Image: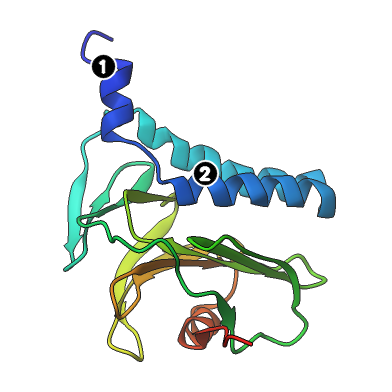
Amino acid sequence: MSLIPENEKLQEQYQLSELFYHNMDNIIRKRQRKFHNKNLRRRCAAVAAVALVILGIAQSQLIARGAEWLVHWFKDHVSFQLEKNTDINRVSRYKFGYVPEGFEQIIDDYYDISGYIMYENEYGNRFDLAYGEIGGSLNIDNENKDFTILTGTHGEEIYFLRAQNPDDDSSMTWISKDGTTIFNLMGDLPEDELLKLQENICPVEHE
């Protein structure tokens, strides 16, 4: 225990982004109203795993280095450490240009600096997109997942955490072409469907 840093040091080094807290508060609150406790526990379990980053004691491995970030692999999570902050105070609102048959939009929230969209079908399969301004770090559960880097249709690098169990969520993370917005797409769908979703994410046109 003597090796564990002071609490203030841990908070400084492993501060989660405001986007993370903001989106998760809204997800949990709305899912409590819309879904059974079983589905809520499933999503909250992923959040609990992400929260383990606060301990930050385990050794990490640098698995990728991009123009905007470093990607570290820990025992319990992957950490995307963003290397720059932008001065923007607003990001575009986004939507899915493609939605698989049978899926219904459950949530579409937008808060100027971030947004969150969720779809689900009658069988309980779901996918969601969180996006927001660049800043701080993003930490994602990597339990029973394989890591690879894909190239998107617009030349962007997609950091893909592929679930080994097809019933679990896979995750795709990337940065917008202009370097101002970070995206995280999650879902328990096949890889080709997730890629099709990723390719067809587009800004909402102003009315």
Three-letter code for the amino acid on which mark 2 is drawn: Tyr
In the picture provided, is 158 more to the left or to the right than 143? left
Residue 96 in sight here: yes
Nearest the eye: 60 or 95: 95
- Quote the CA–CA distance across marks 2 and 1: 24 Å
Nearest the eye: 60 or 25: 25
In the picture provided, is 66 more to the left or to the right than 48? left
Q: Which of the 4 quarters of the picture holds residue 29?
A: top right
| SS at circle 2 | helix
In the picture provided, is 177 more to the left or to the right than 144? left
The structure residue drawn at horizontal position 58% and vertical position 47%, both measured from the top left corner, is 24
The structure residue drawn at horizontal position 28% and vertical position 10%, both measured from the top left corner, is 1
Nearest the eye: 165 or 49: 49
Q: Which of the 4 quarters of the picture holds residue 47?
A: top right
Which of marks 1 and 2 precedes in the sequence? 1
Disc ID at residue 183: none
Disc ID at residue 4: 1
Q: Which residue is mark 2?
A: 21
Q: Position of residue 25 (x, y in %)?
A: 62, 44
Q: Quadrant of the C terminus?
A: bottom right
Q: Position of residue 42 (x, y in %)?
A: 66, 48
The structure residue drawn at horizontal position 59% and vertical position 89%, both measured from the top left corner, is 97
Q: Position of residue 142 (x, y in %)?
A: 41, 52
Query: Is 193 placed above or below 82 here?
Result: below
Query: Is 40 placed above or below 151 here?
Result: above
Q: Position of residue 54 (x, y in %)?
A: 37, 31
Three-letter code for the amino acid on which mark 1 is drawn: Ile
